[in-house]
Image: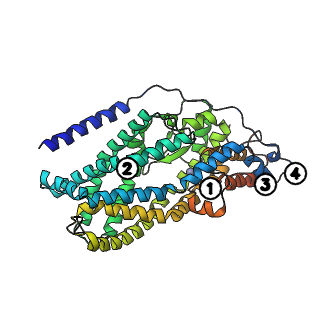
């Protein structure tokens, strides 16, 4: 009885922190820079050459900045593997010390209804896993980001983000765990098909609610204020058949120095969000180039297509995991206190197997995403007609993504094209449209 009280109190405190965090502070929308520098070798003229223009853009990144960006990005190659080994240690602790089994028993003692038992187990696991994963999360999300000058968070603010994340996980994950468990429990030996179907349903629900309920927990999202930036974007948005209301900006600089923008949502909640670092550090043509890219994701239905591609990868992952899990269960299930294939206490092990699958599938997953990103780049060039601005942004993104990798590095580790193919694509487009962009005539309506 006392235990349940404690859980309720923790929940109330977490909700209070979430509500406090959602209180809106007034912030001013940043104004874009007015300059867009074009290297001499990239200017239009009879001697224009795509390769020379591309190299001229790449050379605008200083040696020190380039070395730092290379080191940061190359260090990131190891993170999935480090994360997986860390997870392996966490899961070993949960199973070998009988923690997972005890969390299951806790739920079973508290209530009789299976669904609620699974929910309690899910909530307890979320908390225990968050605590055990904290050291790695701190190193990756705070120490490493600060070491490369990419984070704006104080340690206290970082902790608040973690608590908010934990709160959101506590609201969303336990019911999802309970539903998945209810679906797969009776199919102890053959659960990969129902597990994939249920996971995809939750993925779509997650996509739909993210911009409306989840993203606002961490940042303030506001419609762009009336003015030249909004006018230019709304014009592009209208020209490409998208609802003009759905463009927002948000205060990402609270957390990070990165410039970025994204398309989020699905089934009616789709929107484009620009981060304030982009609004502050880019010129209007650069913002248009970025928005053109984001419009491409929307018009080309990338979210829907990626969900389907992910479903195939996930189905294969669940099938492999089901097979390996059955063997592990025979090997050591008794020692871990797992009763059968449908025992929820085995969840950490299943989750570990799925993560391992996706680490192995990193090149496939990255190539799926990178291909869509490249399509969006081309769409953006045609929509914004700002090849120089696009090239300039591609170089700016090198603050956190290695500018010029080898072909193999790009194939394995890049979920976006690197700077080189992006700048080359822009300069190739410019060669065929020498009048467009940066002082030339723009083909947008007045
Ligand atoms: Zn993109």
Q: In the visual, does 191 lie left or right of 340?
A: right
Specify which label sits upstream in the sequence, 3 or 2. 3
Q: In the visual, does 268 lie left or right of 323?
A: right
| Secondary element type, mark 4 | loop
Q: Are marks 3 and 1 in contact (CB under 8 Å)?
A: no
Camera-nearest residue between 279 and 139:
139
| Secondary element type, mark 1 | loop
Q: Which residue is mark 3?
A: 50
Residue 146, label in figure: none
Q: Residue at x 77, y 54 (%)?
A: 432
- Mark 4 Cα shell of 10 Å, populated few (<14), some (14-19), many (≥20): few
The answer to whether residue 181 is above or below residue 427 is below
Q: Which residue is mark 2?
A: 133
The answer to whether residue 30 is above or below residue 364 is above
Q: Which residue is mark 4?
A: 47
Specify which label sits upstream in the sequence, 1 or 4. 4
- Mark 3 Cα shell of 10 Å, populated few (<14), some (14-19), many (≥20): many
The answer to whether residue 200 is above or below residue 262 is below
The answer to whether residue 152 is above or below residue 96 is above
């Amino acid at each position: 009885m006392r235990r349940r009280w404690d859980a309720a109190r923790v929940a109330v405190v977490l909700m209070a922190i979430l509500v406090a965090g959602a209180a809106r502070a007034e912030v001013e929308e940043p104004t874009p820079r007015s300059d867009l520098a074009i290297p001499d070798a990239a200017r239009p003229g009879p001697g224009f050459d795509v390769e020379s223009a591309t190299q001229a853009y790449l050379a605008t990144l200083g040696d020190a900045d380039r070395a730092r960006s290379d080191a940061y990005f190359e260090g990131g190659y190891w993170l999935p593997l480090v994360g997986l080994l860390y997870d392996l240690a966490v899961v070993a602790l949960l199973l070998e010390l009988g923690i997972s089994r005890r969390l299951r028993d806790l739920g079973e003692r508290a209530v009789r209804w299976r669904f609620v038992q699974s929910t309690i187990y899910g909530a307890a696991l979320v908390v225990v896993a968050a605590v055990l994963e904290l050291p790695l999360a701190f190193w990756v999300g705070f120490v490493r980001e600060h070491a490369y000058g990419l984070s704006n968070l104080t340690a206290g603010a970082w902790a608040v983000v973690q608590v908010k994340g934990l709160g959101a996980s506590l609201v969303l994950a336990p019911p999802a765990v309970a539903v998945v468990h209810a679906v797969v429990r009776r199919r102890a030996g053959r659960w990969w098909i129902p597990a994939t179907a249920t996971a995809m349903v939750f993925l779509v629900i997650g996509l739909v609610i993210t911009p409306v309920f989840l993203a606002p927990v961490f940042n303030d999202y506001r419609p762009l204020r009336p003015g030249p930036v909004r006018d230019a974007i709304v014009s592009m948005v209208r020209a490409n058949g998208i609802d003009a209301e759905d463009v927002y900006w948000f205060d990402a600089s609270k957390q990070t120095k990165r410039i970025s923008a994204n398309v989020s949502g699905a089934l009616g909640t789709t929107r484009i969000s620009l981060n304030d670092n982009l609004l502050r550090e880019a010129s209007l043509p650069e913002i248009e180039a970025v928005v053109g890219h984001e419009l491409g994701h929307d018009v080309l239905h990338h979210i829907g297509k990626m969900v389907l591609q992910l479903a195939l990868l996930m189905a294969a992952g669940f099938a492999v995991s089901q097979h390996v899990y059955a063997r592990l269960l025979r090997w050591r299930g008794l020692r871990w206190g797992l009763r059968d294939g449908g025992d929820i206490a085995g969840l950490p092990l299943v989750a570990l197997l799925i993560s391992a699958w996706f680490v192995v599938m990193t090149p496939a997953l990255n190539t799926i995403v990178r291909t869509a990103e490249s399509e969006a780049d081309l769409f953006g060039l045609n929509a914004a007609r700002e090849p120089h601005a696009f090239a300039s942004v591609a170089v700016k993104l090198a603050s956190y993504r290695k500018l010029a990798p080898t072909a193999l590095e790009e194939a394995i580790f890049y979920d976006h094209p690197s700077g080189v193919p992006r700048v080359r694509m822009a300069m190739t487009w410019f060669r065929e449209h020498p009048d467009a962009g940066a002082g030339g005539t723009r083909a947008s309506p007045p």
